[in-house]
Structure formats: C-alpha cells, structure tokens
Image (cartoon, rainbow, N blue to C red):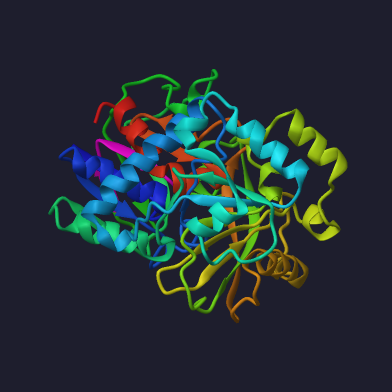
Amino acid sequence: MRVIVVGGGVVGTMHAWQAVERGHEVVQIEREAEARGASLRNFGQIWVSGRAGGEELDTALRARELWEGIGERVPGLGFRAIGSLTPLRNAREYAVAEAAVARPDAAARGYKLVTAAEARQINPALRGAFEAALWCERDAAVEPRTAQLHLREALKASGRYTFLPGREVREVTGTGTGFGTATGPGTGTGTRAGTGSRLGRAAVRDDHGDVHPGDVVVLATGAWLSGLVRELVPDLPVRRVRLQMMQTAPLGEDLTTSVADADSFRYYPAYRSPALDELNAEQAQTPIAAAHKMQLLMVQRRDGGLTIGDTHEYEHPFAFDTLEDPYEHLTEVVESFLGRPLPKIRHRWAGVYAQCTDTTRVVHRQQVSDGVWLVTGPGGRGMTCSPAIAETTANELGW
C-alpha cells in the first residue's frame, strides 16, 4: 500500500511512522522547507497528568508508551521520563491537588502529594517558597524542535519513505467524488464517516503541478485550515488558538522535572472538582494571567535552557506581535519557585494550533473523499497524543 501524508508536523510524521512500521510506502509532503508550526513551537511535554478521564487519558497513556518505545529506537528525540511537579502555595491549591489524588485513575497518572522537602529531593532546583507539590510520575518530555528531523531520518532508513518539502497541496484528485460527514460522538477517535470504501485509489496535486497517487491520503495540516481544507470541509468544527512562549539561556543546573503552577489546574480537565470551584471563587488569577488565560508550564531543554509558557488567545484576528506583560508574569512565577533569577531570555515566540471546538474530543478525524482523511484539531494535546492518534487512524483504516 502507498500512503500519502500531507503535513510535516508531528501528527503527520507519526502517521508516516505508523504506515512505514506496518510495511507500507509513504510519501510525506510539507509546504515549508521544514515544519514550522505548533509541532516545533511547544514544550515537548508528554503531558499525561491533566488529561480528562476516560478516552483522553487512555489516548495519552498509550501515546506515552509509544513515545518511550520510539525514543529507545530514535535517541535524537530526547525522550526523558522526567515526570512533573506542581508546587502548591496554600491550602486552596493543596485541596485541588488532594482531590486529584483521590481520583479513581490517579494511579495511572502517577499522582502523589509530596511535601516541599520531598519535592526538592525530586527536583533540587526548586528552592523557592511553596508548601507542598503534586508529583505526576507519568509525564515525560522530548525535544520538539528536532523531533521531526530525527523521526524522518529513521523513516528514510526504511527505504520506503520519501519526504517532499516546499510543496503545497492544492487539490485532491482520484476516484472520490462525495464528501463524508463527521457524525456521532465517536468521530473524534476514528469512527468512519461518510460513504465509500475505507481505502480507495486517491491522489493529491501540488503547486508544482505534480500528482502523487496513493491508496490512502491523510491530510494532517495542523492549523492550516484555509485553502484546500476549507474547500473540502467548509464547516470544519475546529478553531485556531494562539499562544506565547519563551526560552532562556542554560540554567546552569538540572531542572529534573517539568514544572507547572496551580493556574494549570484551571485549564486541565483532570482537576475539575468542588475544590477547584472554591479556588476559582476565592483565589482569582492575577489580572495579567486572567486577561491572557495563562498558566505556567516549564521544561528544560537538552542544552540546559528552559522553555516557559504560556498564554491562550481564541479571538480572531490574532495579534501579529508578542506582548511583554505575560512574559513578566511568567518570569515572576518561575523565580518564586526557583528562588533565583532566571537566566537571560534568548527567544520569544508565538504559535498557533488547531483545536476541536468541542474540546472534549481528542481529535477531528473525518473522511472527506474516497480514500482521503483529514486529521486535525488535537489542540494542546498534539505533541502528547500524536503517536496514539496516528495508531488509531492506522487501525481504523486497516493498515
């Protein structure tokens, strides 16, 4: 079988990985010289801890397992099973963490409440003021800026993989004439939509005029939702979200875990509870954090620098510039946990990802023509869940 993957980000590359692993030939087409979207502009966190119970958590745990296995074969991914700590500064934050630890799926996440002293044994860089911490053993990290490069090198070694950069796909061609419709509660995880065969002879034409035929086409176009995608699915239930992040010079010591703050409780579904309702009612976010829908997430890169974020912006049109107030807020929070000044900020950037408008759905997977599938909208789950999202696609399509 020949699989055409459109999109060079992590979701597309993991679909290519699944196809090659199952013995198929793959052509992956990317409109830029290299992927430049959310797949690179993220934390590289394999974030199990905050996922909603049920399907989303199951997807994240399976993806965590797949990431670890791929990381053993592709050391350049920089897979690290480092876990995460969320320092807790008062009784209200502690109560939310306590409710999380009481969840029936807490053990699967690796939740544990630890004292401040125990947290510093796990991560000695946390010398600042806090009272306790939520430890999440199942969280992990990879290197987002280089992951796709190393995955592609491994794919090329198979002899069944071709990467075609600098080509924008303009048209879906082939035998398919009718568009499927995503229906029912299962479509977010791969329920087949529309009519026609699961695999059909299909092809895409790029802006060089070349036609690339295959038995199946996967459109993993990330936040690119205009052009061809809009033509195929005019009412796509997916929105774009913008975020700001930054990266420092090397810290000069190991940050042995990822780090979050209690504002992350407000944005991740695993922490919803009466205790969270009380936190929201009695401990408001700072005006800057509330205005920009902020949380702290932080992870150390292999060069020692810290990736720190983030903000969330949902209203279009997005600003074209980055704002300093959110960075100043993040710096203050990080320094309060580290008990020391941050190293110099070397990079600031904004990124945009695609998110299902029904945020309970892991991903939007839809057949848009015979043999042609669109897979998009994982939102902030993309880096975490992409291996399992691709595996589900492969299983559903009978690869």
Count of labels in the image: 0
145 on left or right of 348: left
Viewer-closest of 193 and 292:
292
50 on left or right of 331: left
Residue drawn 52% across the image and 31% down it: 106
Instruction: Check the image and report above or below for 309 versus 96.
Output: below
Asked if the magenta segment contains residue 247, the reply would be no
Viewer-closest of 133 and 189:
133
Q: Quadrant of the N terminus?
A: top left
Residue 223: in sight, yes or no? no
Viewer-closest of 68 and 340:
340
**Which range of residues does the magenta coloring cover?**
211-220
Q: Position of residue 33 (x, y in %)?
A: 38, 68
Instruction: Check the image and report above or below for 155 versus 111.
Output: below
Q: Position of residue 115 (x, y in %)?
A: 60, 49
Residue drawn 51% across the image and 56% down it: 258
